[in-house]
Structures are given as C-alpha cells and as structure tokens.
Amino acid sequence: MPQLVLADYAPQVVWLAITFAVLYLILSRLALPGIARTLGDRETRLKGDLGAAERLRAEAEATLAAYQKAMTEARQKAQAEMKQAAATAAAEAAKRDSAFMAEVNARTKSAEAAIAAAKTAALADVRSMASAAARELVGRLSGAEPAAADVAAALEAAERSSR
C-alpha cells in the first residue's frame, strides 16, 4: 500500500492539502452558495407558509365564532317562533274549546228545557190519567161518579202530603 510507505508520506500530505484547498474553494464558491441560497429560500418559504397558516387559522377561528354566533341566534329565533306558534295554537284551541263549550251549554239548556217540558206534559198526563182512573174507580166502588173538581182536589191534597 503506497500510503503506508514513509518515504512517500510528505508528498502525499502536500497533495492532500492542495486537493483539499482546491476542493474547498470550488465548494465554497460554487456549491455552498447555492445550498445556502436554497436553505434561505426554504426558510423564507417556511416563514411565509407559517404566517399564512397563522392568518388562515385566525380566519378559521373568526369564521367558526361567526358560525357559532349565527347558530345560537338561529336557535333562539327558532325557539321564539316555536313559543309563538305554541301560544297561537293554544289560543286557537282555547277559542275552539270555548265555542264548543258554548254550543254544548246551549244544547244542554235546550235539552233541559225539552226535558222540563216533557216532564210537565207527562205530569199533566199523569194527573189527568190519575184523575180519570180515580173517578172511574170511585164510580165503580160507590156507584156514583164524583165530580172532576172533587177528584182534582183530592189528588192535589195527596200530592202535597207525599212531598
């Protein structure tokens, strides 16, 4: 191996230093500025992207806050409309109920009047039938038919005593 021969060691070190210096100059003048420029561009782009990302995040937060506010307002408006609709429906139901109750009360009064009239007519019929039956019964038992006024008075007295 030539690098291990001690007589060739000094020239190898000189050529190593020359090669290193030339390679350093070439890299420092050509490659390293391009790499530094690329790294600088990359850093600038990253800072710009981070700034844009920060702006977008702030915009997104503002948009989210506006959305949440709009949703809250929409919910409140919907609840208010629902309460109003429920109140309107309740008022209409109460109105219909009161109209229905008025009709039911009117029908009830009409039916009560009809029942009272029927009761009065039935009682009159019962009185006339009782009077006729009493006259006939007294006539059969006694052989003489009593006067209608006497029978009516006796029935009235019996009715008063039963009350």
Image (tube, rainbow, N blue to C red):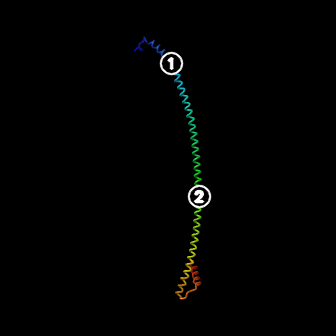
SS under mark 1: helix
Q: Estimate the x, y position of residue 13 in percent, counting from the top left.
A: 46, 14
Circle 2 Cα neighbour tier, 10 Å, few/some/many (<14 / 14–19 / ≥20): few
Q: Estimate the x, y position of residue 42 in percent, counting from the top left.
A: 53, 28
Q: Is residue 107 above or below residue 1?
A: below
Name the residue rendered at 50%, 18% in the picture: 26
Circle 1 Cα neighbour tier, 10 Å, few/some/many (<14 / 14–19 / ≥20): few
Query: Which of 80/162 is in front?
Result: 80
Location of residue 158 by image quarter: bottom right
Q: Which residue is mark 1?
A: 26
SS under mark 2: helix
Q: Is residue 140 above or below residue 51?
A: below
Q: How many numbered discs?
A: 2
Instruction: Tell me the quarter of the image containing the C terminus.
Output: bottom right
Q: Which mark is residue 48?
A: none
Amino acid type, mark 2: Glu
Asked if the residue under mark 1 is in contact with the one under mark 2, i.e. CB atoms within 8 Å, the reply is: no
Q: Residue furthest top?
A: 7
Location of residue 95 by image quarter: bottom right
Instruction: Tell me the quarter of the image containing the N terminus.
Output: top left
Q: Estimate the x, y position of residue 29 in percent, counting from the top left.
A: 53, 19
Name the residue rendered at 55%, 82% in the picture: 132
* Among numbered discs 2 and 1, the one appearing first in the sequence: 1
Q: Residue furthest bottom?
A: 143
Q: Estimate the x, y position of residue 16 in percent, counting from the top left.
A: 47, 15
Amino acid type, mark 1: Ile
Q: Residue furthest left?
A: 1
Rounded to the nearest angstrom, the CA distance separating label 2 from label 1 is 95 Å
Name the residue rendered at 58%, 44% in the picture: 70
Q: Which residue is mark 2?
A: 92
